Image (tube, helix red, strand yellow):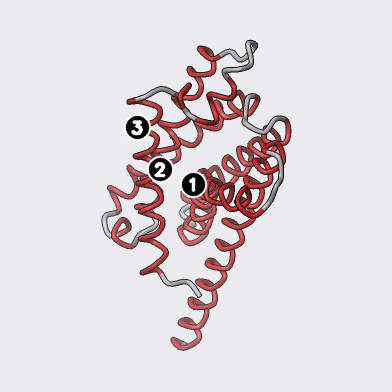
Amino acid sequence: MFNKKLIFPAIYASTYLLTLYIVLQYFIYSPSQSGMVSAKMDDPSFPYEMWKLFFYPHIVLGTIALLIGTYQLTRRSRLNPNRHRILGRIYGISILLNVLVVPYIALYATGGRGSTLAFLVLDVLWLATTANGIRLIMQKKTVLHRQWMIRSYAVTLVFVSFRLVLGIVELVTDLPLGTAFPLSVVLSIFMNLGFTELYIRRGKRALASIRTEAV
């Protein structure tokens, strides 16, 4: 069910494509030229300059977490414990800082209050999974640490997957954006964490089988 030869290249490709889009759209061009942001500009009460002070750290820290997280989950990363530890700290700090700016960004999320609530739930999950992963490695519980960091990265990856889900929802339904946007975030959370739990359980069964054979 889980073919790593297909899953990891797909994750790498999606994160790199999103990174390229972020660089082009928000650094070479301007956030106000983005489709989702340009709609906010029609609202005279939208605090664009203040919003940018939170938005840029959000996308930079999020991109760092995306790129590092993809590499951290590979076997190659764990072959170099020192580098794995350093990158893990950068990943954790990027998320812990990011969860501080997300609530402000969420207040002006596309889709209104439903999107605000969805992103706040996402932010809580991001903090909970990452903080728990950090706590476990400080207790030297490496197996549980890895499981929770996989969950953390599944939440991080929602920032990629929800864009794909949103495109599908808009294609197959006539839902207004105020419904389609938060629905896509929620569906992405369930999808990412659902597949992650199946992946972790499969790993547990494989480990239990190896231990049984060893006995």
Left or right of 70 in this view: 101: right
Q: How far apart are the two marked residues, 2 and 1, measured between alpha carbons?
A: 7 Å
Q: Secondary structure at mark 3?
A: helix
Residue 141: x and y, percent? 49, 57
* Residue that badge 2 annotates: 18
Question: Quarter of the image holding residue 33?
Answer: top left
Question: Residue at position x 57%, y 63% from top?
Answer: 195
Does dot 1 land on a helix, a strand or a loop?
Answer: helix
Q: Quadrant of residue 200?
A: bottom right
Which label lies toward us, 1 or 3?
3
**Residue at image x 39%, y 30%?**
25
Q: Which mark is residue 112?
A: none
> Which residue lies under the disc numbered 3?
24
Q: Amino acid at mark 1?
A: Val
Is the residue under label 1 in contact with that under label 2 (CB below 8 Å)?
Answer: yes
Q: Residue at x 49, y 55 (%)?
A: 150
Query: Under tag 2, what secondary structure?
Result: helix
Q: Residue 2: x and y, percent?
A: 47, 71
